[in-house]
Amino acid sequence: MQTLYDIGYMTSTTSATGKNKLTLYILLAMLLGVIVGYIIHLQSGAEQIQKFATNIKVLTTIFLRLVQMIIAPLVFCTLVVGIAKLGDLKTVGRVGGKALLWFMSASLFSLSLGLVLVNILKPGAGISLQNADVNGVQDIMGKTQGFSFQKFIEHLFPKSVFEAMATNEILQIVVFSIFFGVATAALGDTGKIIVKALDAAAHIILKMVGYVMNFAPLGVFGAIAAVIAVKGLEVFKFYGVYLAEFIAAIAVLWVILLGVGYLILGNRLFALMKRIGQPILIAFSTTSSEAVFPKLSQELENFGCKDKIVSFILPLGYSFNLDGSMMYMTFASLAIAQAYGIQLDVGTQITMLLVLMLTSKGIAGVPRASLVVVTATCAMFNIPPEGIALILPIDHFCDMFRSATNVVGNALATTVVSKWEGELAAEKVELN
């Protein structure tokens, strides 16, 4: 006769097996994408290559759109429920204050680390001005127009919650959800009806996450095949040093982030990294940390973080705590200056860091946000903004590491705040 423990153990084992299979499929999709993309790059003309890349990226577009369709309702439902469970403005302020303390500290440190390492490694010195991707820079240059404090306000306060949801403006959805959640909690028993309904809706959406993740290998294959077909493996010959030095910088950031995480979480850090391994891999291979937002929420709750903490901290983190992107901003900005032979004194570099600290918070939801901020910053400090074309050929591969780092940073932030709040429980046994 089977006990509930036996049933729970078997379903948990089955779930883990399914998770391992998906991870294997994603890795195989990456390898297959490299092979297919390189074959197309070698055996096709420029027109055929571009056509292939455009068509194959449809697979990635489908996967990302499936993820994007559930982000807005998931953020709204889970955040309102979480705030209602937190209970009052005092608790919301305390938890939010701890989160912002981590976010600001991590951002300042990531920017500073990028600044220090780019001065030591000098990656821009090895970049040839002849390798600039002039065609690819036009779209990014267009997005920097009107880049100002006003844009930051527009990205912070929604004029319509429906518009914010339609465009997946996470920060705007968070602002509306905070007001809605606090008001719901203030209604007492009357508000409990709404909380119960939204809680049920959140669980339905999380169930959908499992279905959507089955499309991840196709999205990964499309993304990798497209970029290899266009760029080819030769891109690493010209930018191998730049990429290697950026990976080294990212490795240093990981060591420090995980070191701080270990000081706070102890041995549970290893269980956390195992738990979020799949979201990290998906973010890495699709260059989109947003693509794993729903899955990361689920994994953090299964790790032991309370849903009310996850639903409050994680959406904020996606706007304020992108550690990999932050480090890249100072790294890339100064690398472009080095490529042009422009010397910036220490005072100017520190000023640039402080500017990036502010302006980087105003571009939540903007595609290739790091490059948009780098371009605007270069123009501000008399570095040729068209210099962004120098790093565009290798940016896709840099973005893979940025995206994976962003996932790690947000997972740590959510878990650490849960620990500080005394709300970090034991890992859950997965029952499907």
Image: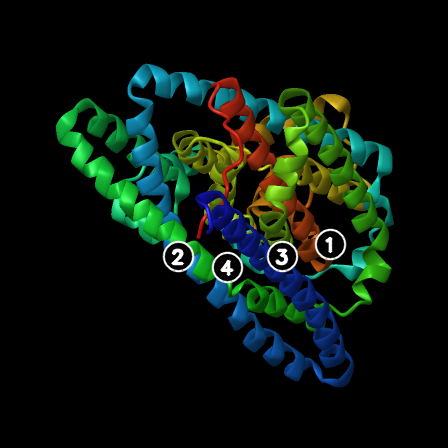
* Mark 1 or 2, nearer chain start: 2
| Kind of residue sitting beneath label 2 | Met
Q: CA distance from mark 4 to mark 3?
A: 13 Å
Residue drawn at x 29%, y 21% is 87
| Kind of residue sitting beneath label 4 | Met
Residue 20, numbered circle: 3
**Can residue 113 be spotted in the picture?**
yes
* Mark 4 or 2, nearer chain start: 2
- Residue identifier under label 4: 213
| Kind of residue sitting beneath label 3 | Asn
* Mark 4 or 3, nearer chain start: 3
Contact, CB < 8 Å: mark 1 with mark 2? no
Q: Secondary structure at mark 3?
A: helix
**Can residue 135 be spotted in the picture?**
no
Say few, some or many: other residues with alpha carbon within 10 Å of mark 3 (under 14 / 14 to 19 / 20 or more). few
| Kind of residue sitting beneath label 1 | Leu
Please name whichever residue, 307 or 414, is drawn nearer the observer in this view of the structure. 307
Q: CA distance from mark 2 to mark 3?
A: 19 Å
Q: Secondary structure at mark 2?
A: helix
Q: Secondary structure at mark 1?
A: helix
**Residue 228's image quarter?**
bottom right
Report the side of 195 relative to 357 (left or right): left
Q: Secondary structure at mark 4?
A: helix
* Mark 3 or 1, nearer chain start: 3
- Residue identifier under label 2: 208
The percent position of residue 189, horizontal first and vertical second, equals 15, 27
Residue drawn at x 38%, y 33% is 153
Contact, CB < 8 Å: mark 3 with mark 1? no
- Residue identifier under label 1: 390
